[in-house]
Amino acid sequence: MDNIKTIAKNKKAFHEYFVLESYEAGISLSGTEVKSLRAGGVNLKDAWCNIEKGELIIKQMHISPYDHGNIFNKLPTRDRKLLMHKREIMRLFGTVKQQGLTLVPLSIYFKGSLVKVQVGLCKGKQLHDKRAVAAKKDADRAISRAIKEQQR
């Protein structure tokens, strides 16, 4: 069994989108970026993925510069290449183009010593969808509270 340690989750993605499928991808990073990730210096809030020239690219993911990295630090929001099999990328490309879906990074984590990104194939939520989800959460919370009170 692999040792999985979550670095960051994109909570905004679950609020803004319906996640239809999720995929695991490796990510191409420099050494100082990995050290910064170990310190927890990453933000996925505004990040998104795009397929360019047959490669999966993650954009606007902010990795803070490493404190002791000096000249080896890279730009915090540079585009980074995600590592997946070519046929998986082509299948995702077809799905995104035909159905108008979006690729969004859901979480970033260490799997053993490797850094992995969970990428979700997502469909955007409308305002009424967000309200319905919030109402359902409130109802579930009220039901569980009532059950706890009943058991006392």
Image (cartoon, rainbow, N blue to C red):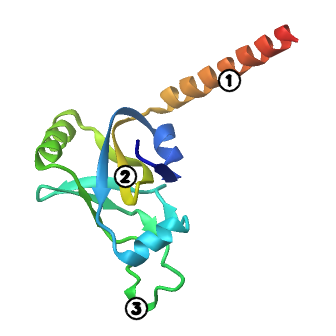
Q: Secondary structure at mark 3?
A: helix
The label shown at residue 2 is none
Query: How would you rate the neighbour count of disc 3 (Cα within 10 Å): few for under 14, some for 14-19, many for 20 or more?
Result: few
Q: Residue at x 49, y 79 (%)?
A: 66
Could you tell which of marks 3 and 1 lies nearer the N-terminus?
A: 3
Query: How would you rate the neighbour count of disc 2 (Cα within 10 Å): few for under 14, some for 14-19, many for 20 or more?
Result: many
Residue 129 drawn above or below residue 49: above
Tell me where residue 132 appears, x and y as whole percent: 55, 23
Tell me where residue 146 appears, x and y as whole percent: 79, 13
Name the quadrant of the C terminus.
Answer: top right
Judged from this view, the residue extending furthest toward the right is 152
Residue 149 drawn above or below residue 45: above
Q: Which residue is mark 3?
A: 71
37 or 92, which lies in front?
A: 37
Residue 75 drawn above or below residue 17: below
Disc 3 from disc 1: Cα separation:
50 Å
- Pointers 3 and 1 in contact (C-beta within 8 Å): no
Tell me where residue 125 appears, x and y as whole percent: 43, 33
Give the residue type that dot 3 points to: Ile
Mark nearest the camera among 3 and 1 is 3
The label shown at residue 117 is 2
Mark nearest the camera among 2 and 1 is 2
**Any part of residue 76 in sight:** no
The label shown at residue 138 is 1
Q: Residue at x 48, y 66 (%)?
A: 37
Q: Residue at x 83, y 9 (%)?
A: 151
Could you tell which of marks 2 and 3 lies nearer the N-terminus?
A: 3
**Any part of residue 124 in sight:** yes
Give the residue type that dot 2 points to: Val
Could you tell which of marks 2 and 1 lies nearer the N-terminus?
A: 2
